[in-house]
Amino acid sequence: MKAFILIIGLIIGLMAGLILVVGLPEFEKPVANDLYRGEFIDIKGDTIRYFQKGQGPDVLLIHGTPGVVEDWETLAKELEKDYRVTAYDRPGQGLSSFQYNPDPLLYNMEIAAGLIKALSLTDVIVIGHSYGGAIALALAVQESPEIKGFVLLSPASFPTGGFKLFDLIAGYPVAGRGLIRIIRGSVIPSLIKNGLNTAFNPNLKQKPDYYYETRINLFIQAKALVSTYREEAFFNKGINSIKQYYGDIKKPVLIIHGESDKVIPLYVSQELNNLIPDSKLVILNETCHMVQYVAPEKIKEEIDAFTETFVEEPQIE
């Protein structure tokens, strides 16, 4: 029995040592090519990739996790007709760099606020999807003067249940990098594919044929995976620090949620709608978590109507 315990301990020690050794090298630097064009800007020590297209009122798009700026391709094409659209890769995602931070949600909020100021965006409509919706909510409780209103698409807005040990380990320096590098070639691709199918269910026919192929190389980067798991592990900490202030949000808020969302259930946004004063909830029937792919024209219509409420009536002298 003692020999068995000794062998098990030795195996665990060797595995832990292997993980640490593999995790020692820093993250590989992603290489941009023609498929991933964009501009780069330094915000709070991170190099952020962003795109800016169109003319008109400013709109800032914040993607979920994992995610990249290309996740906005369908909705951005609609919005560019009437708005100046800015979209970016969040820290750790896509071609943006990554720094460890004790509170990923609030750090992402600081990056978004820094980007707004660095690019001189004014009277911005912030649009956040999923985890990006949580970032938008973190901005909303700050009362930023540059922001006019918020559009939350299937937002992650309340704590999730359970303690996720794997997420916690994978989200830490050295050990996280090592663990991810060891398993990402065999385990991670199928997890990503299943996750994407869940996000598009029940609208799988509307998932572009190229979607998986164009995302996998970016999602499977060590920094992207560590960033994703770290955001998951510390999500409850971040969201608990802001949810108590939802009732104090003063800026206009539009919430759009798919009725058939398999990632974040509809009732989450219904509860959020009840807490934020004067917010509006739009429910898209038979629609999945990736609402921007299934109903970009409908979302554009709702955003147009939402922004019209900001136009001040001319004063009659």
Image (cartoon, rainbow, N blue to C red):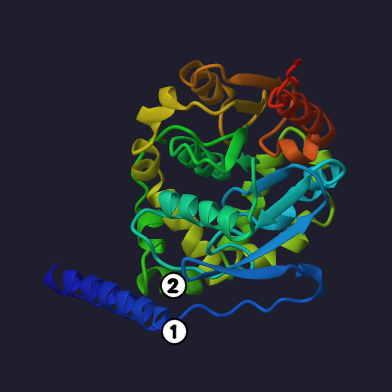
Question: Residue 265 in the image: x percent, y percent?
Answer: 56, 27
| x 84%, y 53%: residue | 209
Q: Which residue is mark 2?
A: 177
Question: Residue 183 in the image: x percent, y percent?
Answer: 50, 69
If the image is split into quadrants, where does the C terminus sit?
top right
**Depth check, front residue: 280 or 131:** 280
Q: Secondary structure at mark 2?
A: helix
Question: Residue 296 in the image: x percent, y percent?
Answer: 81, 36
Residue 214 vertical position relative to residue 122 in the rendered view, above or below: below
> Residue lying furthest right in this view?
81
From this viewpoint, is residue 153 visible?
no
Q: Amino acid at mark 1?
A: Pro
Q: Which residue is mark 1?
A: 25
Residue 298 vertical position relative to residue 180 in the rendered view, above or below: above
Do labels 1 and 2 touch, CB within 8 Å? yes
Instruction: Tell me the tag on residue 243.
Output: none
Q: Amino acid at mark 2?
A: Arg
| x 58%, y 40%: residue | 147
Indicate which disc, 1 or 2, sits on the residue closer to the N terminus: 1
